[in-house]
Amino acid sequence: MQQLRRGDPSAIAGYRLLGRLGAGGMGVVYLARSGGGALAALKLIRAEHAADPGFRERFRREAAAAGRITGRWVVRVLGADPEAREPWLATEYVPGPSLAEAVALHGALPEQTVRALGARLASALADMHEAGLVHRDVKPGNVLLALDGPRLIDFGIARSAGATALTATDAMIGTPGFLAPEQARVAGAGEVGPASDVFSLGCVLAYALTGERPFGTGGVAAVVYRTVHEEPDLTDVPDTALPLVRACLAKDPADRPTALEVRAALGEADGPAGDWLPPGLPALIAQRSSRVLDLPVPEPTMLADSEPQKGPSRRRVLIGGAAAAVVGAGGLTAYLANRSPGVGGTGGPPRTLATYTIGVQTDLSGARKADGRGQERGVRLAVETFNARADRPFDLAVKVRDDGGDPRRSVTAAEAFGKDRSVLAVLGPTNQEVVLAALDVYQRNALAFASVATGVPTETVSQLGSTPAYFEMRPLHDVLSLGFSTISIRRRQRRAAFIEDRASGTFAWFAAKSAQTAMSRVSVAVTRHQVAADSEDFGTAVRAALDAGAEGVLYAGMSPRRAGLCARELRDQGFKGLCGSVEYVLEPEFFKIAGSAAEGWYIGTTYVDPALVPAAKAFTAAYRKRWGLSGAAPVDRYAVEAYDAVNSVAEAMRSLERDGLAVERSALIRRLRELTYQGVVKKYGYNDAKLYRFTDQVFVHRIERGVPRFRGLFGEAMKDEVADSEKRSASGT
């Protein structure tokens, strides 16, 4: 919210103005307080528009009709004066976020929530249609979320008062992407009836269920064409809701259900809302509600007018009002639904904050969908936690695109994020192929692209130029063998062998070479044995390694299946020594193929189990609560790393603002390269060569009873290994 300006009135018809919520060509929207203490959104229409007799008549007619709407799920009109020199109207105020903002922050909503939402919106539309009104602009931005249910705003009056589109027969009515085909065809007001609202409601339901617009995004012409001529994309709409949504989106208005029929299909609309919102949103709504309890009364902005007037004018008598607590919640104007979330500290009014969007491009439907889910969850928790801070200088939002782990889909997702200028950084790739496919797109758009779950070859990172857009927020995968090699050294082994899996390309060579260099410095003899990319015969390589007297064997590769074959061969040939590999093999297929042969393997990773890290206790508790996990449930892989990545990006944005610089893509890339950030479990930063600085952040997991158990940073794991070794020696095992 902005402060009142010198030219603003201090009061209008008994409403004490507290600040500006927004302004447009037709007028200004104010946050106001009534004489009884209730907050309201008050819109004042500019006198030049009110001079049009047709405009004033339409305002008068629809204000009277809206006054008859008493439904629970629409904002009530608290007052209006269409006869004033500057007409005005006041509606209830809802401090909660819009549906559009909620989906941006939290993603698609659960079906149970959407059913409760849809039933109440359908009830609101039914009341409006009975009163002779057609909303004409039902969209996520016009749905505000309160603790007891949604509120539909910007109906009838607000649109009449805010735009001539409602009455112009040659203008398109509504918002592309959520308007009906008859609206998109610029059919005129005569053909835009209750069925148009039902079509828009269907679009809103699809959007809430999937997080995507059913007719896609892009230019207005393209979206309008798809609305009129093509079928909606309802791929991700649950089967249980699909028939109703499809019926609402029928091209012919006569084929659509009525609002009453939609309400009946979705369930009870007038009962208690209860805990209809998913985790995270009630806290956001409560937080915003609490901010308006302590709004101060601004100083008068205008001198008293010596001539009394029937309605408000640009010069206004100061009408005092006692500061009072909020006594009710209600609707807000269209501005609030589309504004950036505001924040206010104690002792001052809320501020209008900029919103910066974090993109998530990850695998949510492919082979590594579990890792993609962990990253998405970590990102969302970070954004929600950041936005809950009273001292934050801006808000964050989230947009998610599923690349399915497919390089082609990766390019498509990257192109979409590149064109979306609201997105300033993107996180979440899950494999090397999607990174390499999308790199050029992100580089061309100067859009930061960060990975916590994927390792790419060193030579690829170094060739991205002086200001690479790609950020590997983890040690390069060449050093992951550090976990195995340090344990081997700590056991005082003299011979080790590496099984180089040529199916893993250059990684196998780099991993083996890195470990060989480290181990040779402490007089550990290393032999390397290759397995051809087109062969699954690990027997020959394992036999050669054991013939060389290996006391420890590392599978140097990235394939879970082939690592399982190697483990089985080691077991079958009677090897009882140290075995290990790196994090890429820790997939279900490895355990399926290896079976009991995986027991005791040591795996070098770049990620931690936050549940076993004391510094991450608060994160772990918040994560489990946010995602409804039990107290013993494991935290998803890469979740805390993704959480840290978001906060490091946010810190880079804060530093730009502190330096008086614009928070934009290129500046953010440069600042991220300069920043060292202490996260929940580790530091993040880059050296002069643009490579990740903290290459010693290799962690160790040990397979115990068929499950990877986190043993800590490789140095800590060495201490545990010594203790375990001494216990084994003492027991003779």
Image: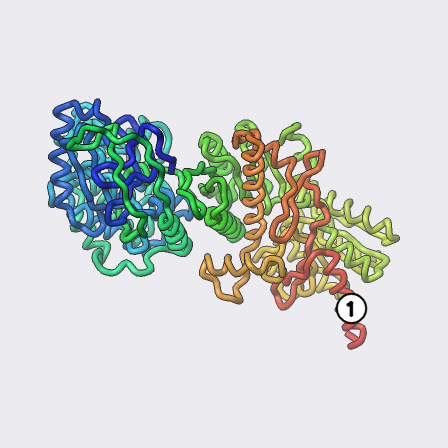
Q: Is residue 236 visible?
A: no
Residue drawn 35% across and 55% down? 277
Name the residue carrying label 1: 725
What kind of residue is marked 1?
Ser
- On the image, the x and y values in percent for residue 337 come to 32, 40
Residue closest to the far front:
306
Q: Quadrant of the C terminus?
A: bottom right
* Quadrant in which residue 271 is drawn: bottom left
Q: Is residue 512 left or right of 316 when viewed as pictured?
A: right
Q: Secondary structure at mark 1?
A: helix
Camera-side residue: 454 or 496?
454
Instruction: Answer above or below: position of 535 versus 26.
Output: below
Does residue 240 sit above or below 49 in this rendering?
below
Q: Horizontal placement of 532 versus 384: left or right?
A: right
| Residue most extreme to the bottom | 731
Q: Position of residue 45 (x, y in %)?
A: 23, 30
Position of 568 with respect to 620 (left or right) is right
Q: Within 10 Å of the Cα at label 1, are there few (<14), some (14-19), or many (20+) other Cα atoms?
A: some
Instruction: Residue at 68%, 35% (x, y): give it.
Output: 690
- Nearest the viewer among 247 and 450 is 450
Q: Is residue 161 visible?
A: yes
Q: Quadrant of the N terminus?
A: top left
Please provide percent x and percent y for residue 659: 58, 32
Nearest the viewer among 238 and 98 is 98
Residue 552 in picture, x, y percent from top left: 78, 59
Pick whichever, 587 or 181, lies toward us.
181
Image quadrant assignment for residue 497: bottom right
Question: Looking at the picture, does residue 198 appear above or below residue 282?
Answer: above
Whether residue 79 sits left or right of residue 348 in the image: it is left
